[in-house]
Image (cartoon, rainbow, N blue to C red):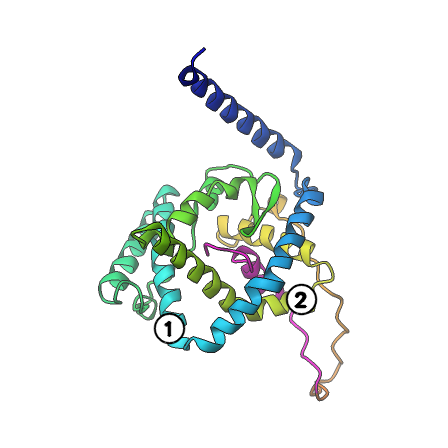
Amino acid sequence: MSHSSRRPVSRLAIVLATGMLMAALQGCATRQNPDPLEPWNRKVFAFNETVDTYVLKPVAEGYKTVTPEPVRNAFTNFTSNIKDIWSTANLFLQGRFKDGTLGVIRVTVNTTFGLAGLIDIATPMQLDKPNEDFGQTLGVWGVKPGAYIVWPLLGPSTLRDSLSLPGDMYFSASTVGTYPRESNLLMAWQLINTRANLLDAGNLVDDVALDKYAFIRDAYLQRRQNLIYEGDPPEEDEPPEPQRQDLPEAPASPAAPASGASAPVSEAAAPVVVADAGQESAWAMFP
């Protein structure tokens, strides 16, 4: 048999094997056990933490120190405007045509009057930023999340949300690069800029989580369900509450905190902030 005739068979085998693996992971994951790959995920999580501690976080701290805030904000707006295109496309795929139309207007305004998105003019005009991706679209279509997965460098995801990664990668700063070197430089800049924006959130996770892995996992799953159901998920689909460090009960009468003591993080606020840090994780290359 010739090499050319073997290639289609090999590709078909790969597709079938991938489909069988995805089906198996979908079947293994349940509401009570959304993380059947936990032993492997923890190893990847530890690898990501090591890379972040010794490479990404120090670089991001230096970048934040030497880069003026207006420059960082302009680049954040620029990458956010590109992502808005992907979010708007997913609004239409979800059948939310009114929101999709507002998304088109937002991108048009920021691209034309905001200097290609460097300035966010649309938000003050009450054209709110959409936050959609293909994983959410699949969720709206009824696809279950499947197993929780931690990807090297990219951070937390699920089997369903992983299908959104190609679109997230395409609608990022690297897509405007003409040559591979330009695309790689823009990708690295976006990674460092994103990590710099998450420095405070990352410190919060370290302060409140007994088990950082479980805390980020549960907060990520909770946030994704809330995004799919627009803040009102059905009770049977709600993932477990994120684990939080036990904090001392507040005194009966208000009193100022002792000097040097840090104020406790509210239980309502902590999961939201950490969920943001989980989705746009310390390693998220494509926010």
In this figure, which residue is indicated by the disc labeled 2? 206
Q: CA distance from mark 2 to mark 1?
A: 28 Å
Mark in front: 2 vs 1: 1
Where in the figure is residue 59, as x and y percent of width and height?
53, 68
Magenta segment, prevailing SS (helix, strand or loop): loop
In the image, what residue type sits under mark 2?
A: Asp
For residue 67, side relative to residue 241 (left or right) = left
Residue 33 painted magenta: no
Q: Is residue 268 visible in the rendered structure shown here?
A: no
| Residue drawn at x 34%, y 51% as measured from the top left | 175
Where in the figure is residue 132, as x and y percent of width and height?
43, 51
In this figure, which residue is indicated by the disc labeled 1? 71
Q: Spot the residue most to the left.
A: 112
- Are there few (<14), some (14-19), or many (20+) residues within 10 Å of tag 1? few
Placement of 183 over or under 200, stated as above or below: above
Instruction: Give the magenta part as a residue range.
Output: 260-287
Q: Earlier in the sequence, mark 2 or mark 1?
A: 1
